[in-house]
């Protein structure tokens, strides 16, 4: 007795939209706000100034990330909509030419001319615009641009990442804020880099090391700039 199994494969490419925004937001939140905290602390500023700088950097950075991500992804979405409008017009005015264009795509992918024509006709009858969007333009539902989702993921991740250096300024002794923030930042980057690599199917160690490397450079540069403007009496 045969039994049918309903099997749904989960591919990592389905996460690419929100994952990219979340990883970028978290890493930017950790590095940029930690850089502000380390730089201001290294200058000899009082603890209240260091904390205020971290909080202000968190708010401004989250809004900037959300706006930048929204505008960027919205531009991609607008391009997709424009391309779909062109295809919709061509399907209405030149259906035969569009059918042959679709058949040619399948021939180039290895189907015989007869099978390519049959596949093109059946897909056109089922959903002509969907077939052209997927196979001619490379637009799929999983990879469609989603501006609002990307903006929210980026802003939320930025705030979560920035929470680490801001928390450090609250609990660390003021004399050692720069050193402790740098250490905690590198640990945080190691974790986010590893998690992002795992979610994307890449080696975790490699993902952790590359974000830690750039984070260490950012912390060193911030501390150097802070010492140039030393305000300690």
Image (tube, rainbow, N blue to C red):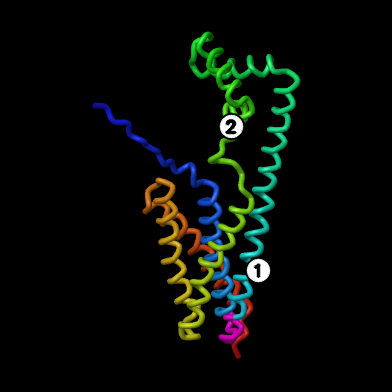
Left or right, 129 with reference to 221:
right
Res. 209 visible in picture: no
Q: Position of residue 29 (x, y in %)?
A: 55, 65
Residue corresponding to mark 2 = 138
Q: Position of residue 11 (x, y in %)?
A: 43, 41
Is 173 within the magenta?
no
Give 229 or 110, whichever is nearer the viewer: 110
- Report the magenta residues as a range: 43-51
Please state which of residues 26 and 9 is positioned toward the viewer in this rendering: 9
Does 13 sit above or below residue 154? above
Across and down, in percent, residue 19 comes to: 51, 51
**Which residue is more in the foreground, 185 or 134?**
134
Q: CA distance from mark 1 to mark 2?
A: 36 Å
The answer to whether 190 is drawn above or below residue 136 in the figure is below
Disc 1 is placed on an element classified as helix
Quarter of image, res 85: top right
The residue at the point 56 percent across, 75 percent down is: 37
The crowding category of the residue bearing disc 2, from other C-alpha atoms within 10 Å (few below 14, some 14 to 19, many at least 20), is few
Outermost residue to the left: 1
Picture layout, residue 8 above or below residue 174: above
Q: What is the number of callouts on the image?
A: 2
Front position in the image: 74 or 127? 127
Whether residue 163 is situated above or below residue 156 in the rendered picture: below
Q: The N terminus is located in which quarter?
A: top left
Identify the residue at horizontal 41%, vertical 66% (top origin). 187
Q: Nearer the viewer, mark 1 or mark 2?
A: 2
* Residue pictured at 60% horizontal, 30% vertical: 130
Left or right, 154 with reference to 96: left
The quarter of the picture where the C terminus appears is bottom right
- Residue under label 1: 60
Circle 2: element type: loop
Seen in the image, is 49 located left or right of residue 111? right
């Amino acid at each position: 007795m045969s039994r049918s199994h309903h099997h749904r494969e989960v591919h990592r490419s389905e996460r690419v939209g929100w994952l990219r925004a979340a990883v970028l937001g978290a890493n930017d939140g950790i590095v940029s706000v930690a850089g502000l905290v380390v730089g201001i602390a290294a200058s000899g500023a009082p603890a209240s100034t260091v904390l205020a700088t971290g909080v202000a950097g968190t708010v401004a950075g989250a809004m900037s990330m959300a706006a930048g991500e929204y505008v960027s992804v919205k531009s991609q979405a607008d391009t997709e909509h424009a391309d779909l409008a062109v295809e919709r017009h061509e399907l209405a005015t030149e259906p035969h030419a569009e059918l042959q264009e679709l058949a040619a795509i399948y021939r180039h992918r290895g189907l015989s001319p007869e099978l390519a024509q049959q596949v093109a006709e059946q897909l056109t009858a089922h959903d002509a615009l969907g077939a052209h969007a997927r196979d001619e333009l490379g637009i799929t539902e999983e990879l469609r641009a989603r501006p609002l989702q990307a903006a929210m993921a980026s802003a939320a991740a930025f705030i979560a990442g920035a929470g680490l250096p801001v928390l450090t300024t609250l609990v660390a002794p003021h004399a050692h804020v720069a050193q402790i923030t740098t250490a905690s930042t590198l640990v945080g980057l190691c974790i986010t880099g590893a998690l992002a690599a795992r979610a994307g199917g890449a080696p975790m160690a490699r993902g952790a090391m590359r974000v830690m490397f750039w984070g260490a450079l950012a912390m060193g540069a911030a501390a150097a700039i802070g010492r140039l403007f030393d305000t300690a009496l």
